[in-house]
Image (cartoon, rainbow, N blue to C red):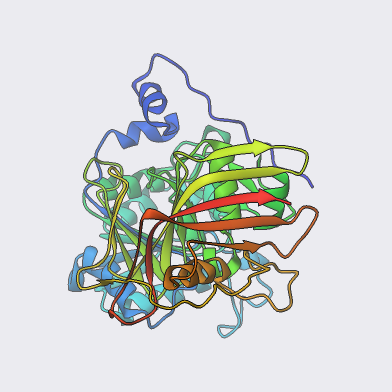
Amino acid sequence: MNARALPRRTVVLGTAAALVAVLTGVPAAHAAHSRQPATGSLVLVGGALASDNTEIYGEIIKRAGGSKARIGVLTAASIPESQDPDSADPDRCSNSACNGAYYASLFKKHGAADAQWIPIDLDHIDNADSDTIADQVRSMTGFFFGGGDQYRYVTTLLHGHQHTDSKVLAAIRDRLAHGAVIAGSSAGAQIAAGPDMVTGGDSYPALRDGSSPGYFDDPSRLGYLPDGGFGFLGSGLVDTHTGAEGREGRALRLASDTGHDRVYALDENTALVVDAPGTQREAITVLGANGVGVFDIRRARTRHDRLGWSLRNARYTYLTDGDHYDPRRWLASPAQGKHRLTPIDDTAVPANDDVFYSLADPAGTPYSFRGTARALAATSAQRSATATTYETGPRFRVTLTKTPAFSAWAEEADSAPQSLIDMRIAVTPE
């Protein structure tokens, strides 16, 4: 398949921005902006944000000023009106303007004083450098990036291969530095990532073939942008729709291939809330119905042999509603009131022959990886459990192990495990 030409990051020594890029891993185009600590926050949703999710919409609005919140809605990841055959039908349209109106209406419904579409998309790229639109952005206290294709945000709000901010993106970045909230769902969360932002891919092809820089016509091929997205969150890679689409495998492979130590694997209808991103005070809370996986591969080891790629000694933590995470200390803390569980059930962990929920499996189950992890946490009969990929040639075996430091938590002392802290993961071909 063809890939768009995407140059790797380069550093021109001798400038302050380049020095920051060398020390922090932030591209030089972003580094000049990163010198100003963010006093704002991020609310990043793993996709499929329900219209009635009052917890997450309410959190965004609260952080934007409550009843005085003014939300700017950006939907450039959607197709523009010119490409939408249903653009004239308000019940079927799915373009940037239509989606912008939808989200603006939702934010007003949930209590924002005002919400406006920021008119930038593939039909209106020039608006990204419009002084008028930049002034509109400066009047906002919060921003929401809708879903679609994150590469369209790169195309519309960044200056091509230079990867420098448009006037509108610079204004948004400045508002974040001065206390605004930036939220997004699916592609709108993904674009917050820094270097090596994922552009597509499924878990099995990722484990088998590895990753490549670029944006590919084949959606199953694991691709990434070396220069990344907007760089609002730099403490780890970001992935979305993780459990619902079985993306845990691709998250591990991309982090390993690109030299990242951590991945935030966001589930649907659930938010990763980040206070003071990019500072020593950065702190994370999880909100929503599902959770956020944190993959720690600082101590992981990879190997290539005749069977294929393998990874050992990765760590997996799964955080749910109200849990906290300190990125600087790599420390997860269950929400106040949650109970630590002692497994008393001696039931064996059910077999799982589709750990990454393959599209090829007609009987596949979403959240399959999480299901095996929670089943292992619940039993006293096993310290480790294995699951495999649906595909073969090779088949990959995933081994999950309860470390001495492992713990499981739930809202009720006698309920099933919800949050999981420090489980060991290995992926091997067979």
Q: In this orientation, which residue lies closer to the viewer: 224 or 303?
A: 303
Estimate the x, y position of residue 194 in percent, counting from the top left.
45, 42
Outermost residue to the bottom: 91
Name the side, left or right, on which 393 lies relative to 177: right
Query: Is the residue 306 above or below the residue 341 in the image?
Result: above
Estimate the x, y position of residue 24 in percent, counting from the top left.
37, 31
Estimate the x, y position of residue 271 in percent, counting from the top left.
37, 65
Asked whether residue 122 is in view, the answer is: no
Name the side, left or right, on which 19 lies relative to 154: left
Q: In this orientation, which residue lies closer to the viewer: 109 or 352?
A: 352
Report the number of numbered marks.
0
Q: Which residue is drawn at 61% across and 79% down?
A: 88
Residue 139, located in which quarter of the rendered image?
Answer: bottom left
Q: In this orientation, which residue lies closer to the viewer: 357 or 187?
A: 357
Q: Residue at x 65, y 49 (%)?
A: 428
Name the side, left or right, on which 71 lies relative to 8: left
Q: Which residue is drawn at 59% across and 38% down?
A: 302
Query: Is the residue 91 above or below the residue 40 in the image?
Result: below
Name the side, left or right, on which 94 lies relative to 229: right
Query: Is the residue 10 above or below the residue 152 in the image?
Result: above
Asked whether residue 353 is in view, the answer is: yes
Estimate the x, y position of residue 18 in percent, counting from the top left.
40, 23
Q: In this orientation, which residue lies closer to the viewer: 89 or 353?
A: 353
Q: Which residue is drawn at 21% across and 48% down?
A: 39
